[in-house]
């Protein structure tokens, strides 16, 4: 249904939670190296529980290789400085969502390469930096899935 791209994730439980989210929404997960952990990390397994068997996690050496492989018709970069709120966009099956590192988000170079229209944000109280990565992914994916009447994809 949707593609979730985590660019250089650093915290294993966040990625484990996203694995569980993918299993429950039919989304596909793409991890772009370097990772801040081993894919076999115990914390990753604990957060993902047995859902890791239900999701094919694809890994890429860099963002360019990932984007070439995913080839989504529309790609959205979810970042605190995004021009539009994620809830104001009409999402379609096949859309992809790019999330940056927990500590730094997406680099200026990545954001500039995608253009301003591709950047979306999650509203927050003024003065706050960001919300947890796995929470951000959940908010955006469930909104996209809701807009598509929670259609089930049995072959993620």
Image (cartoon, rainbow, N blue to C red):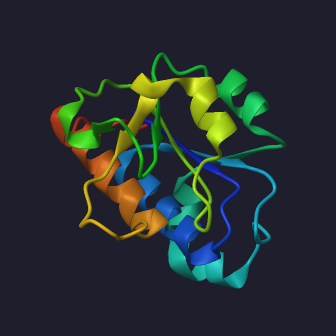
Residue 23 appears in the rendering: yes
The N terminus: image quadrant: top left
Q: Choose between 112 and 134: the one closer to the eye.
A: 112
Q: Position of residue 152 (x, y in %)?
A: 29, 38
Side of 85 where 93 appears, left or right: right
Side of 16 where 97 appears, left or right: left
Residue located 74% across and 77% down the image: 41
**Location of residue 99 with respect to 77 vertically, above or below:** below
Q: Which of the 4 image quadrants contains residue 137?
A: bottom left
Side of 96 where 5 appears, left or right: right
Q: Position of residue 84 (x, y in %)?
A: 29, 35
Mark count: 0
**Location of residue 123 with respect to 141 vertically, above or below:** below
Residue 95 appears in the rendering: no
Q: Which of the 4 image quadrants contains residue 69?
A: top right
Q: Position of residue 5 (x, y in %)?
A: 58, 44
Residue located 43% across and 70% down the image: 132
Q: Choose between 23 and 137: the one closer to the eye.
A: 137
Q: Position of residue 102 (x, y in %)?
A: 58, 66
Q: Choose between 80 and 37: the one closer to the eye.
A: 80
**Location of residue 64 with respect to 27 vertically, above or below:** above
The residue positioned farthest toward the top in the image shown = 73
Q: Choose between 38 and 55: the one closer to the eye.
A: 38
Residue located 52% across and 23% down the image: 115
Q: Which of the 4 image quadrants contains residue 62?
A: top right
């Amino acid at each position: 249904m949707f593609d979730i791209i985590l660019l250089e994730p650093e915290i294993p439980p966040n990625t484990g939670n996203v694995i569980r989210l993918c299993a429950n929404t039919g989304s596909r997960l793409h991890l772009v190296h370097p990772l801040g952990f081993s894919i076999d990390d115990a914390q990753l397994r604990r957060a993902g529980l047995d859902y890791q068997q239900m999701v094919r996690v694809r890994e890429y050496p860099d963002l360019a290789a990932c984007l070439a492989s995913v080839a989504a018709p529309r790609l959205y970069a979810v970042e605190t400085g995004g021009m539009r709120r994620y809830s104001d966009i009409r999402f379609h099956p096949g859309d992809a969502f790019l999330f940056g590192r927990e500590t730094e988000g997406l680099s200026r170079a990545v954001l500039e390469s995608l253009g301003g229209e591709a950047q979306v944000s999650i509203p927050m109280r003024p003065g706050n930096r960001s919300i947890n990565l796995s929470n951000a992914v959940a908010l955006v994916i469930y909104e996209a899935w809701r807009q598509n009447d929670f259609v089930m994809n049995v072959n993620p």
